[in-house]
Amino acid sequence: MARRYRYKLRIYPGMKTTPILQTDVARLDDAPADDARGAASQRRALGDFLRAHRERLTPAAVGLPPIGRRRTPGLRREEVAQLCGLSATWYTWIEQAREVSISAGALAAVASALRLSRAERAYLFELAGRRDPERGAEPLPHHAAAQVQAAVAAVAAPAYALDRCWDVLAWNDAAADIFRGWLDTPGAKNLMRYIFLDVGARALIRDWDSRARRVVAEFRAECSAYLDDTPVRALTDALQRESRVFAALWSQQDVVEREGGRRGFHHPVRGDIDFAQVTFRLSGHDDVKLVMLLP
């Protein structure tokens, strides 16, 4: 039942007011309870997930000797705690969905002890509401890099692939034709450095000011989990030193999701051209993006 409160409201001449319905008060009052129920449900899901994977493992599978008769399948909670170097009581509380704090390091130890796959590990951290310290830390495997190259080359429209720093991993001839003086020249390619440090970008990108503001906010959103990673930190530090525009926009702390939409260019040969930008992410490496500019 919603609690009721008494308020004193002073109305001044000319002040516009909006009536507050009783249902609005009840909805606001119930929000903390809804949050608590959601957190409890998340903890139960986490406990169920850990229990299921613990029961699938045998002592032999993790290098432990079989000791005594077992009334339940799989590992004991104490054995998982031993493998993780954690308190047995603390691990038990997690499985019991008690309200305990779980660090990312402890979750990583649990994931390793339970022999979780990449997808299972990602799901574990999602349930716990923590960032995986090893998420995306490994380089793109050679076979995956080759697949990215092949995918970009197979696209008829202008296309390119970016990593977490927005370094360009691959591009096709159609993209090189759009970004003349950048993609068609030798050397490393970074989209952020191109936009803010290459004078050709201002001439090519229509509405450069608004696009620059948005890409900074998009970059911050995409790199939120990696801002302390050395390559990302080195890039943002360098851009703040070398571009006053980037430094000013970065300091505003704006964050927006990456969206598609129309992209306009002043092409030196073809004149004004427009595309619809579409972005896809690589399965298993969500920091790698395939960007296509469709007619």
Image: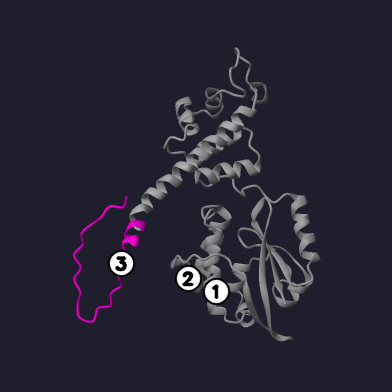
Give the mark toward the camera: 3 or 1.
3
Location of the C terminus by quadrant is: bottom right
**On residue 249, which mark appears?**
2
- Mark drawn on residue 20: 3
**Crowd around label 1: few <14 · some 14–19 · many ≥20 (10 Å):** some
Q: Which mark is residue 212?
A: 1
Instruction: Name above or below for residue 88 compared with residue 11.
Output: above
Amino acid type shown at disc 3 = Ile
- Label 2 neighbour load within 10 Å: few <14, some 14-19, many 20+: some
Q: Mark 1 or mark 2, which is nearer the start of the sequence? A: 1
- The picture places residue 10, in percent across and down from the top left corner, at 18, 71
- The image shows residue 162 at horizontal and vertical percentages of 66, 62
Specify the segment rendered in magenta. 1-27
First in sequence, mark 3 or 2: give its number. Answer: 3
Camera sees residue 113: no
Badge 2 element: helix
Mark 2 vs 1: CB contact within 8 A: yes
**Among the two numbered marks 3 and 1 on one chain, the one whose residue lies closer to the N terminus:** 3
Q: Amino acid at mark 2?
A: Leu
* Residue for point 62% across, 41% down: 120
Bin the neighbour count of mark 3 within 10 Å (Cα to Cα): few under 14, some 14-19, many 20 and up: few
Q: Kindly report the distance in space between the C-alpha atoms of the residues bearing marks 3 and 2.
A: 38 Å
Along the line of sight, which residue is nearer the eye, 128 or 147? 128
The kind of residue on which mark 1 rests is: Ala
Residue 15 among magenta residues:
yes
